[in-house]
Image (spheres, rainbow, N blue to C red):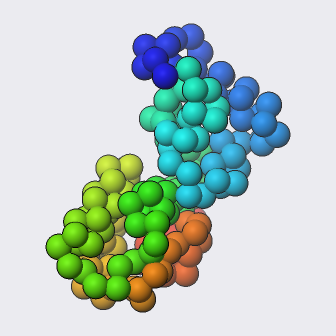
């Protein structure tokens, strides 16, 4: 993908046109149909040559803000990063290698978190490390029960 090309023209219109062409009425619906796909994979599906993952994320944040579902959106990158970094689920033993894999997934999650939720995400990550989930735990959606406990919906 050409970074320069992805920002040319009316990229939001291009993004939403592609979403509609695939049969979805929103970017959120498109992304939720692929809960463990990375933002890059979502962008490539929408346009390998002219859509960037950051554009997908920006659109998702804007939709979540309009629908008062930002906290749910914040859980979504955790699912995506966890699937990529820990495909077999939470490690049975947090040795140095496993701790690094968990730290990378948590760091990536934090990187995709709006400022308004950074402290919540930091506390949720600390809670996961202090009280690890069962070995093999893999959240498959932002509505995972444990994720909702760690980061409950707050929006009205």
Is residue 20 among what the camera can see?
Answer: yes
Q: Position of residue 37 (x, y in %)?
A: 56, 51
Locate residue 34 relative to residue 74 in the image: left or right. right
Residue placed furthest toward the top: 9
Q: Quadrant of residue 78?
A: bottom left
Q: Is residue 58 above or below residue 142?
A: above
109 with respect to 52 (left or right): left
Residue at 56% across, 58% down: 36
Residue in the image at 56% along x and 10% along y:
9
Indicate the quadrant where residue 156 lies.
Answer: bottom right
Q: Is residue 67 left or right of residue 134?
A: right
Where is residue 54 drawn, in percent x and y? 45, 35
| Residue at 50%, 43% in the rendered image | 39
Residue 40: x %, y % from top left:
49, 39
Total labels: the figure holds 0
In this rendered view, identify the residue nearer to me: 87 or 27.
87
Regarding residue 154, the answer to whether it shows in the image is no
In this rendering, is residue 109 above or below 120? above
Residue drawn at point x = 46 percent, y = 17 percent: 2
Q: Residue furthest left?
A: 96
Q: Does 41 sit left or right of 101 as displayed?
A: right
Above or below 20: residue 111: below
């Amino acid at each position: 993908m050409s970074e320069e090309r992805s920002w040319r023209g009316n990229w939001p219109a291009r993004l939403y046109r592609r979403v509609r062409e695939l049969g979805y009425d929103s970017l959120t619906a498109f992304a939720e149909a692929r809960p463990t796909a990375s933002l890059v994979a979502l962008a490539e599906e929408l346009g390998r040559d002219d859509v960037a993952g950051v554009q997908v994320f920006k659109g998702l944040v804007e939709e979540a803000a309009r629908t008062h579902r930002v906290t749910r959106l914040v859980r979504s990158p955790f699912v995506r990063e966890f699937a990529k970094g820990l495909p077999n689920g939470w490690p049975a033993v947090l040795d140095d290698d496993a701790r690094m894999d968990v730290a990378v997934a948590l760091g990536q999650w934090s990187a995709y978190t709006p400022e308004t939720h950074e402290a919540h995400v930091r506390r949720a990550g600390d809670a996961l490390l202090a009280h690890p989930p069962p070995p093999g735990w893999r959240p498959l959606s932002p509505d995972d029960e444990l994720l909702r406990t760690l980061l409950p919906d707050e929006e009205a």
